[in-house]
Amino acid sequence: MFLGSSSARHHRYVSGGIYVSNSKSSKNGNSAAEAARIALADAQFATVGNRLKTLSATEPLLRAYGEGPVAYAGELTKQYAALASRPRPSVPAVKDISPRVALTLDRLADIFGPWQTVAAPTATVGLVEKPTSSKTSGDVNGILSPGYIIPSAAISNSGTLEQWWVNTWQYIIPLPITPTGPGRLAYRFNVPAGLEFYRQDFLSGSAHVYATVATTNDLASRPIDFTHPVSSAFAIAQDLPTSEVPPLLAGGVTVNGHIDLVAGKTPAIGILCGLILSVAQGEMRVIPDYYSYIFLSNPDAKTNADIGKIEYRIDPIFWVEAVTAKINA
């Protein structure tokens, strides 16, 4: 678990493994871990809120497990209040050209200047957390290859309050050094995700897969800081168990953005992919096979050769200004 003394000043846990961050920012070296905890709190907030909405349907099962519905509801209410009061990190405003100009540049690039591709490296493991309760066991893992993750899990919890497991994987993708400047680098890619469950023998649970993206125009002097992302979204956000047979979940995130270039500097994109699972009163297994995946791909991917890559293109400033002038004429 990432629970060192240096971070304990800013983090607190309430019962049920609910995480609340008291910090508004983090140094670059810890930004991936802090960003992962923010995503965890977002997932917990949504799941606990849904549990409160469906208390009447859950009551017969709770009684069958010997749990008092009133005590269960009180614990959920306490968790929800703690999550609702957590500070939210500020998202800096990103200045860019008008949407019409950006769309025109994209269309012209498809005709005159094709997008370039760059392969992602093998991800490094970021934050890994699992419950400390004696009622829980198991781990969430991933098989890693360049730009591709095959997630797996075998977790269990004998308590009626959901406990949470987190695993994150981080990519840092340097892009070509800017020979002259200024300029604008546009990028785009998809993050498809899928999970196949071997079994869903539990009272309740949830599954979340997310992608957080941060950028820099000078990797050497301004490392990637995931606590100030340009985008963060869930590819999968699902309460469990599902009624699907077999139980398969799938989704995806589409990412588009830009970096303002500085001459002689190396721009870079950081991508944080995370898997968050929760379970109560039972066992959950995610099978590491064809239907379990988190990977990067070109937006127009057609073959396996497009997997594990992102697209970018560089627009010189004179070209951006010329297109802007034409659009505004």
Image (cartoon, rainbow, N blue to C red):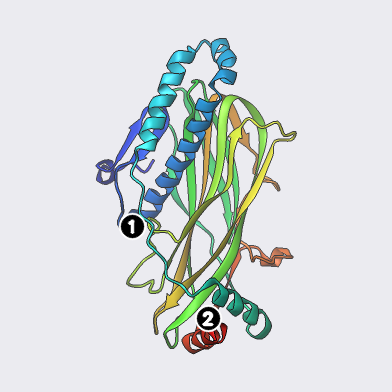
Q: Is residue 132 above or below residue 297?
A: above
Q: Amino acid at mark 1?
A: Gly
Q: Is residue 210 visible?
A: yes
Numbered tag placed on residue 314 in the rendering: 2
Q: Is residue 176 above or below residue 190?
A: below
**Direction front: furthest residue:** 329
Please name whichever residue, 110 or 224, is drawn nearer the observer in this view of the structure.
110
Q: Residues within 10 Å of mark 2 (few under 14, many from 20)?
A: many
- Asked which secondary structure carries label 2, the reply is strand
Name which quarter of the figure residue 134 lies in. top left
- Kindly identify which residue carries mark 1: 29
Q: Is residue 12 above or below residue 71?
A: below
Q: Amino acid at mark 2?
A: Ile
- Asked which secondary structure carries label 1, the reply is helix
Residue shown at 46%/22% (left/top)?
A: 135
Q: Seen in the image, is 224 located left or right of residue 291?
A: left
Residue shown at 59%/20% (left/top)?
A: 57
